[in-house]
Amino acid sequence: MLSIRDNHLSRRSFMQVGGLALGGLTLPQVMAATGEEDPWKLFKGKTVIFVFQHGGPSQYETYDPKMTAPSSIHSMTGEIPTSLPGVTFGGTMSKLAKHADKATIVRSYRSGSNAHKIQPIVSADTHNANIGSFFSRVVGTNNPENGMPTNIAAFPNAVDENEPGPFNTFGVFASSGPFNSGFAPFVPGTGGEFQKDMELCIDRTRLDDRRSLLSGLDRIRRKLDGGLADGLDRFQRQAFDVVTGGVAEAFDLSKEDPKTVARYDTSGMTRFEQWEDKNNKNHYKANSQSLGKLMLLARRLAERGCGFITITTSFVWDMHSDINNCGMVRGMDYVGNPFDHAISAFIEDVEARGLQDDIMLVCTGEMGRTPNINARAGRDHWGQITPLLLYGAGIPRGKVHGQSTRNGGEVLSNLVQTPNLVSTILDTLIDIPQLRLRVDVPREAMDVIAGHRPIDNLYS
């Protein structure tokens, strides 16, 4: 968890805050340079939160139960009616079922791979970069209004220091692909340099003294340089906002209303002894302990101007029923219930705050699961159908997009593939017609951002 201190300023932060007046290359000057190029105008002002269901969720036990199929195929958790007439979800999704009228459920998304890669968040279709890296490459790495990183990836340790960071065995979530590593997602909770720079390490009185000194030096500089430094004043304030907690507080859930934290919290929904016989027990624990708070963190970051946020569920959706993983019924109890609770709490909170037009939620994994239940009451890898939930930022409310075949194993209509999903996400974030007019966008970025069609018929 991001720590915030008020007692003493680190030498690095001290030099960065003081360096502007002394002529060093500092955060205000970097922000100023970004502002002069004005790439921020390409940003549509919306946020995409991508919840990656790591391991590969089942389409049957989530949003396409197929209860008319044989018992060897249909949802092992039964079905539950939703707020959409004639549409049912898997039996574990009781809370999300009440919000089906607010979201689009895609029953025709094909990830195309049976392997534990981390598509679509990082894939060959994104030149092996996190989707958010394309956004930050185009608009800049920090929001010019307050210094908030534009691309963030949060893992369990972002909200609980006792839980693990990213599980990168099957792919690096914070990969920047062909771009400079500066465009990689900022990862809170890992103790990186950017995070250290957001910690306050002197008391605020001394920092105010530094602010006064800096202002005095800048007055002298303005007399020497005429109006040259005037344009940096806004960026100077932004730098102080970062260092003094304007950004850092967004990561601090102790600043949130305790009742709101409790509504999101999933940590009490399961018990460690329920899965201690499985090798993946630490993943189950991390998911249960952190998912609700990660969704709350994502909402706080979105409110403060972060454009793309990656959230992962830890590696818990691989429900083969073997020495490593739970089967479908047990797995949906331990994994599906926290997911249902956390995503529902997020939707309810966003709706209550009137943010539904500003935040897009994407929930999917790297693949779906086999039509046939295996001999151990689990399901194996299946890349032909992957469950996908879309919500907010203009996504149609109360829609089921596409159909699967009678056994739920193939796409029957309105095929959606990873490039279509990625294009839809980036089109939500970036003014692509204006982007096409720019000559400074790398080919790799333009290929992914503007090289494919968004999801066909999504808005019709």
Image (tube, helix red, strand yellow):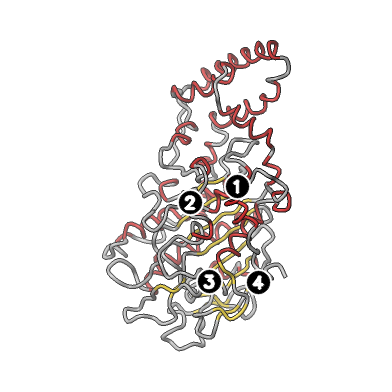
> Within 10 angstroms of label 1, few (less than 14), some, or many (20 or more) residues?
few
How many numbered dots are placed on residues in this image?
4
Q: Nearer the viewer, mark 3 or mark 4?
A: 3
> Is residue 278 rendered to the left or right of residue 138?
left
Measure the C-alpha gap from mark 4 to mark 2.
Answer: 28 Å
Dot 3 or dot 2, earlier in sequence: 3
Q: Position of residue 8 (x, y in %)?
A: 44, 22
Q: Position of residue 281 (x, y in %)?
A: 31, 60
The residue lying at 49 percent from left, 21 percent from top is 15
Q: Which mark is residue 442?
A: 1
Query: Which residue is denoted by mark 3 in the rendering?
Result: 110
Q: Amino acid at mark 4?
A: Lys
User: Secondary structure beneath disc 1?
Assistant: loop
Are dots 3 and 4 in contact, CB under 8 Å?
Answer: no
Dot 1 or dot 2, earlier in sequence: 2
- Looking at the rendered image, the quarter that the C terminus falls into is bottom right
